[in-house]
Amino acid sequence: MYVKDRKVIAKSTDKCFIGYDLGTSGVKTVLIDSKGTLIASAFAAYRSSSLKPGYHEQSPEDWWDAIVKTTRRVVRDSKIPRTKISGISFGVQAFGTIPVTKEGHALRPCMTWLDSRSTNEANRINETMGISISAKDFPAKALWIKENESDIFAKAHKIVDCDGYLIARYTGNFVCPGEIAYGMGFDPVKKQWQFESFGITSDKLPEPVTTTTVVGEVSPAAAKQTGLRPAIPVVAGGSDFASAVVGSGAIKPGRAHVYMGSSAWIAVATNTLPAAETELGEAKGQGLVRQYESAIFSGNFLDRLIIGGESESACACLNWFKNELASDLDEKAKHAKTTPHQMLDKMAEKVQPGAGNLIFIPWMKGERAPVKDDFARGAFIGLALTHRRENLVRAIMEGVALNMAWVLEQIQVGHNLGFEVQSLRAIGGGFKSRIWTQIFADVMGRRIERVKWPDYAGAIGAALFSSLGTGVYKHFDELDGLLPSTFETTPRNQYRDTYDRLLANYKRAYAREIEKIYHEWGPV
């Protein structure tokens, strides 16, 4: 694990809040004032392991070590008195599955949101209950632990998600935000867990609460480790999706944001009721557009629906290319006093839109949307001897954008929003690249507004959860557009036909015969 410093961005004597964005590659920790201004930030990386195809695990203890180190770093760098820190909260990678002791310590590594080993369990649940969950979803993974590691399941005091784990380590309490609980199998209408018949009983699961509920206080033990004062209120928080909605500022109905980090997603706020899943394309094999209802927000937000679609791999694809096919850029970047990713940007800029009739499919770890298939794989389609590395870089950037354009189309048309999404606020480290941001605008045909501190927007959103939970703000609408945008780009009309044709061909990449090959090969 390593910790990356960030210089202090601003100083404040106002109430301050700490937010954590527990991602796939590491944790981003911020300290902000009540206006959302970034005062200090830090990043700590941790490793994933994949012992077999379909397996994807992380050590929760590594997460906690990263939380401790980055918390100490932002408190030290901010020079803010500890008495000014008035709350903490979280935005986490969703649907991790962790059996824990009464003390909140993990009994095994976390099966992350990318872990797809539970195919048989998911199929059995779906056949029995007439639903459609993925092997990557919490219920299937909890059942896998019960049936394959029965001793661990028996010892577990609770089976929690990533947010629940961090709350337990900070407070000793076992709860989870309602938005995450919904994905774990909690029925918000009946107010009960749905998988009792499979032995995933309510006594093994945390208590659902709202996103802005104060779920406890920083314990003396956690305070000693992190350098915080004891008794700071801890607010429930939610998934990285939920914290991104707040951090993006696209909260009021009609507003939308796009995130691009290791994964990618699009979220649109609306007042209309959700369409049936079959209308969103799942029954036709076009992919699942995940529905995030108002349970991700507080009671004051029950009229709000956030419709979102998530793709499993985005920047992860470009990082794979850099590490496996362009590792020479590390040394070249040092001599040029730049970064490997800035060199990749320069490579992409040399290639015309369309990448020389080369299409990249970014489904390198299965996919959720726009196609729902744990076995789906990535591909370059149209490789020719005339293509150079620059073409591949451009194709990867365009492929991720095309994938998300398809997701937006499913949300826009399949959900029948009743309004046209005109622009998207952009967050996530991928949008630090101006060429990639421009590609998104060109492919989607919409204005893209990159917010200030795009790589820390999720952590800032998490910190703002605690400002709501502690009463600084009364309603989520007060946070709409709180973070300013610092770069905007509009679509270039001369490339509209090029990208329309590319998108049409892109959608043909998930042909039935190709799907059969993916499933014959098995999990990624």
Image (cartoon, rainbow, N blue to C red):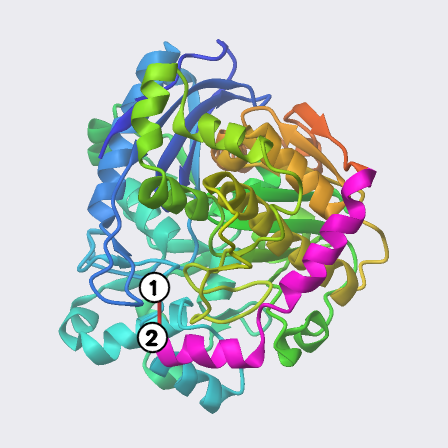
Q: Are the two marked residues, 1 and 2, in contact with CB atoms closer than 8 angstroms?
A: yes
Indicate the position of residue 244 as horizontal and vertical percent values.
56, 41
* Of residues 208 and 370, the one drawn nearer to the viewer in this rendering: 370
Q: Amino acid at mark 2?
A: Ser
Distance between the alpha carbons at the discs numbered 1 and 2 = 8 Å
Q: Is residue 101 above or below residue 246?
A: below
Name the quadrant containing residue 488: top right
Lateral position of residue 470 relative to residue 328, left or right: right
Judging by the rendered image, the residue that carries numbered circle 1 is 115
* Of residues 521 and 156, the one drawn nearer to the viewer in this rendering: 521
- Res. 450 visible in picture: yes
SS assignment at label 1: loop
Checking the image for residue 142, the label placed there is none
Lateral position of residue 13 relative to residue 138, left or right: right
Q: Amino acid at mark 1?
A: Asp
Lateral position of residue 292 relative to residue 317, left or right: right
Q: Residue at x 42, y 47 (%)?
A: 316
Q: Is residue 51 above or below residue 177?
A: below
Judging by the rendered image, the residue that carries numbered circle 2 is 118
Q: Which residues are magenta?
A: 493-522
22 falls in the magenta region: no
